[in-house]
């Protein structure tokens, strides 16, 4: 897979829609992941920008609480997480 530079995450109660793009904006992947699949998938990616929705209907902890998903434990800490 070509190196992803930004990952967009659409949050929901049970499923996350994940969209990866290269630095030139080309789509590299679109995936529908469960809460259990999400941290495992993120661990396979190189460090990159991760943008997560922050609207009132987002059913997920803030980026400060991503430790709940275990992302820091699996080496995703090199990525830059932010709410949009």
Image (cartoon, rainbow, N blue to C red):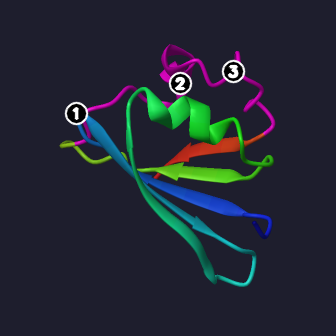
**Cβ atoms at labels 3 and 1 below 8 Å apart:** no
Q: Which mark is residue 30?
A: none
Q: Which of 80 and 1 is in front in this view?
A: 1
Q: Which mark is residue 13?
A: 1
Residue that numbered label 2 is attached to: 66
Q: Residue 72 carries which label?
A: 3
**Percent from the top left, x then y, of residue 81?**
62, 42
Q: Residues within 10 Å of mark 2 (few under 14, many from 20)?
A: some
- Image quarter (top left, top right, bottom left or bottom right) of the C terminus: bottom left
Query: Looking at the image, which residue is at 58% across and 18% down?
Result: 70
Residue 59 quadrant? top left
Residue 34 quadrant? top left
**Cβ atoms at labels 1 and 2 below 8 Å apart:** no
Secondary structure of the magenta portion, mostly?
loop
Mark pair 3, 1: CA separation: 21 Å
Mark pair 1, 2: CA separation: 15 Å
Rendered position, 56 above or below 59: below
**Percent from the top left, x then y, of residue 23?**
75, 76
Is residue 62 shown left or right of residue 75? Answer: left
Q: What range of the chain is rendered magenta? A: 58-78
Which numbered disc flags the more N-terminal residue, 3 or 2? 2
**Cβ atoms at labels 3 and 2 below 8 Å apart:** yes
Is residue 37 shown left or right of residue 61? Answer: right
Q: How crowded is mark 1: few (under 14 residues within 10 Å), some or many (20 or more)?
A: few
- Image quarter (top left, top right, bottom left or bottom right) of the N terminus: bottom right
Query: Looking at the image, which residue is at 70% across and 15% down?
Result: 73
Query: Looking at the image, which residue is at 71% across and 22% down?
Result: 74
Residue 57 quadrant? top left
């Amino acid at each position: 897979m070509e190196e992803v530079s930004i990952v967009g995450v659409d949050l929901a109660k049970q499923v996350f829609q994940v969209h990866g793009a290269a630095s030139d904006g080309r789509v590299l992947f679109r995936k529908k992941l469960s809460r259990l699949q999400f941290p495992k998938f993120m661990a396979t990616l190189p460090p990159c920008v991760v943008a997560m929705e922050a609207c009132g209907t987002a059913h997920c902890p803030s980026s400060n609480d991503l430790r709940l998903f275990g992302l820091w434990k699996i080496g995703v800490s090199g990525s830059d997480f932010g709410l949009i």
